[in-house]
Image (tube, rainbow, N blue to C red):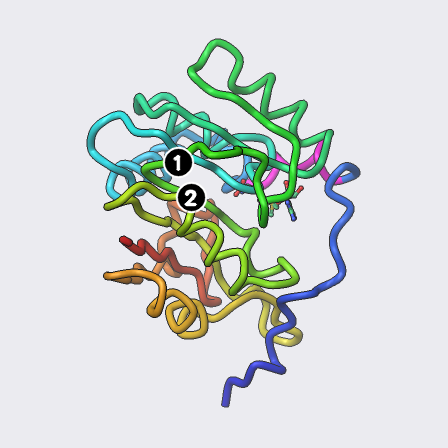
Amino acid sequence: MESENTHRGAGAPEADWDALAAGFDDEPDHGLRDPEVRAAWADRLRAWLPGDPADLLDLGCGTGSLSLLAAEQGHRVTAVDRSPAMVERARAKLAGHTAEILRGDAAAPPVGERRFDAVLVRHVLWALPDPAGALRHWTDLLRPTGRIVLVEGVWGTLTPVGIPARRLTALLEPLTRRVRVERLSGHRALWGKEVDDERYAVVATV
Ligand SMILES: C[S@@+](CC[C@H](N)C(=O)[O-])C[C@H]1O[C@@H](n2cnc3c(N)ncnc32)[C@H](O)[C@@H]1O
């Protein structure tokens, strides 16, 4: 049976994202270089984000692949990452788009009093030291009727890491009006390969 102890997550030793930045986009779901994978993520984003152009905050944006898709869909993107090498790549990727890429902590993004229609976070929350605190802060950054879109999972089977959907929804339920989980395992087009561990998206509306 699954237990909290079987999923190393919050407080996990942090990867050296500066060192990983150069090769990050080689993974199909990171670089979105394969048109089929790119189209699959574009379709999901279109379904998860507001229909009209919106102010979007992408936290832990990495090389900016999802930020770019969102900008291409007309959203005004603010993206934040703590790794200077990731920020540099994201800035290059989003050059010419309505986007601002900031260096900072995803848990306390340097956005001052600005408020957003959507906060998007893929594959970042699970490793933050205080996921519950980060979620509380992110809901405070939303305008009324805003939404949080989280893409998370539990990776691997022998020594799984990540955050199970049921734990994430339990954290979100007291903070939001509606929480919807979408299973993403088994959708080869999203990952560029067969995936059978737990992958999901959560769309939570405040
Ligand atoms: C697995 S990558 C995901 C990148 C991007 N969200 C994506 O899905 O392509 C994790 C990213 O989160 C960033 N990150 C990790 N902890 C962070 C923190 N506390 N604040 C800001 N960025 C962080 C890393 O630098 C890295 O770029």
Displayed quadrant of residue 146: top left
The amino acid at mark 2 is Leu
Examine the rendered structure and indicate whether residue 62 appears above or below residue 181.
Answer: above
Extreme-front residue of the structure? 113
Residue contact at pointers 1 and 2, CB within 8 angstroms? yes
Residue under the point 38% across and 65% down: 172
Residue holding disc 1: 115
Look at the image and give the residue range highlighted in magenta: 20-27
- Amino acid beneath label 1: Arg
Quadrant for residue 126, please give it. Answer: bottom right
Q: Position of residue 204 (x, y in %)?
A: 31, 56
Question: In screen coordinates, is 177 left or right of 67?
Answer: left
Residue drawn at x 70%, y 35% is 21
Where is ligand 1, by quadrant? top right
Image coordinates for residue 48, horizontal then vertical, percent = 28, 44
Residue that badge 2 annotates: 141
Q: Earlier in the sequence, mark 1 or mark 2?
A: 1
Secondary element type, mark 2: loop
